[in-house]
Amino acid sequence: MRIAISTLNFLHLPGAADFLRNFIRGVKNIPQTKLYILLNTGNVHFYSEEDADYLLYKKSGLTLLRYHLNSKLGEDIMKDIKILPYSPKKDEIASIDRICIEHDIDVVLPAVYYGTNTPSVAYLYDCQHLHIPENFCVEERNARDIYFKNIIENCKSTIVNSNFVKEDLVRFFNANPANIFALPFTPQINKTTISKDFNARTFYGLPKKYFLISNQFWVHKSLETPIQALKNFIETYRDGYIVFTGKMEDSRFPNYISDLMSLVDSLKLKENLTFLGYIPKSHQIDIMKNCVSVIQPTLFEGGPGGGSIYDSEALGVRSIISDIQVNKEIPSNPRVKYFKARDPVDLCKKMEQVWQESYQLPSEEQLVNAASLQMDKYVQSINEAIQWATGDTRICNTTKLPKLSIITVVKNAEKP
């Protein structure tokens, strides 16, 4: 089977690229497949001698497109995958379909569009606009509703990041549960982001003990909660410290970052935390490996724990996580503690517990074995989604499925 990976809308944000990276890792575990990756050349940066990365690009000896994708997804992920470039003039979806037909592609995934002749497995992120409508303007909410409705009505097979999202699609959009495939929580070690020669604690001047929060600075991440909890924490542990990483920007709430800084000032916490902003992934991982615990205060996620808990579980690092419904899909283990969402007092109690407890990271062998077991389930879910979209029982012969109807060609979806 010839499978094409769609990069449309997946390379612009770190979290989306992380998802696509793991997704490709899963697809590569499907036997008897040939993999391709679709790339809009209009989104590729053309290096000039003035660019900081120009020499790295020239020394790599790679084509520009492969260098671009290696930098976004990793050389290990891109290995043995053929690149299918396209240059859309007006209709990107038609361009994707045209090149897939030219190369006899059997299925495209994860697709954020519909209306193609080539079978596809769609992807939907989450229904945050229905759970926290105040975070979106009316136009955004309506556009999301229309987009989700079109995907559900016109796509035979759709993958999501959690059972929570699947339940939402059934509840809010009357989706057929049989058409929605929830990917299980599958943390994987990305060895390319682990550096043995780099010491992030020394590089950034961090204390010996600290908590870590690695999130986008969006209002639904509830970053004020750990800041307030830290104020209580240092009353007992004066050396308490939190390291924040992540892009400090929220386009919907432009005052959110300044409000957080004002909160830090009012609580007199400048000596007990630091904001590093967006840093290289390898730096973030090194900081995470050496932290007391990752804190995830989020009020909403489409996948369990968000990206930071995915990484912490892959590394065997402890975490303190808000008790929202989707986070409960993380398999139970002693590394994970939950606190009441928005409750800095309860969060402080959990911080005190992990600060006092001794802990040793699992061995790499233990982590690899655990990751392998989870990946088997992940691949099975992708297999089933592909079979449902294509009707090809060679891909997954462990599940009996009814006969599939002919895929209807419909108008292109509006972009979300």
Image: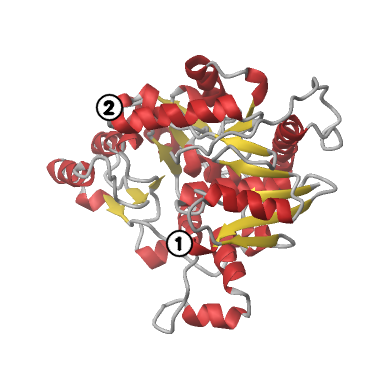
Dot 2, crowdedness within 10 Å: few (<14), some or many (≥20)? few
- Quadrant in the picture for residue 175: top right
Disc with the residue nearer the chain's start (2 vs 1):
2
| Residue that numbered label 1 is attached to | 280
Judging depth in this view, the residue of 204 and 48 nearest the camera is: 48
Left or right for 37, reference 355:
right
Q: Which mark is residue 107?
A: none
Residue 318 screen position, x and y as percent: 51, 40
Relative placement, left or right, of 227 versus 387 is left
Horizontally, residue 254 falls left or right of residue 383, namely left
Q: Could you tell me residue 41's position as x and y percent?
A: 53, 64
| Front-lying residue, 166 or 104 | 104
Real-space Cα distance between discs 2 and 1? 32 Å
Q: Is residue 159 above or below residue 283?
A: above
Q: Is residue 95 above or below residue 306?
A: below
Which kind of residue does numbered mark 2 sit on? Glu
**Residue at 64% across / 43% down in the picture?**
109
Residue type at mark 1: give it.
Answer: Pro
Q: Residue at x 81, y 49 (%)?
A: 33
Q: To which residue does mark 2 refer?
A: 134
Q: Could one spot residue 137 in this view of the protein?
A: yes
In terms of secondary structure, where does tag 2 sit? helix
Q: Residue at x 71, y 40 (%)?
A: 375
**Horizontal relation, residue 364 to residue 201: left or right:** right
Q: Is residue 113 above or below residue 92?
A: above
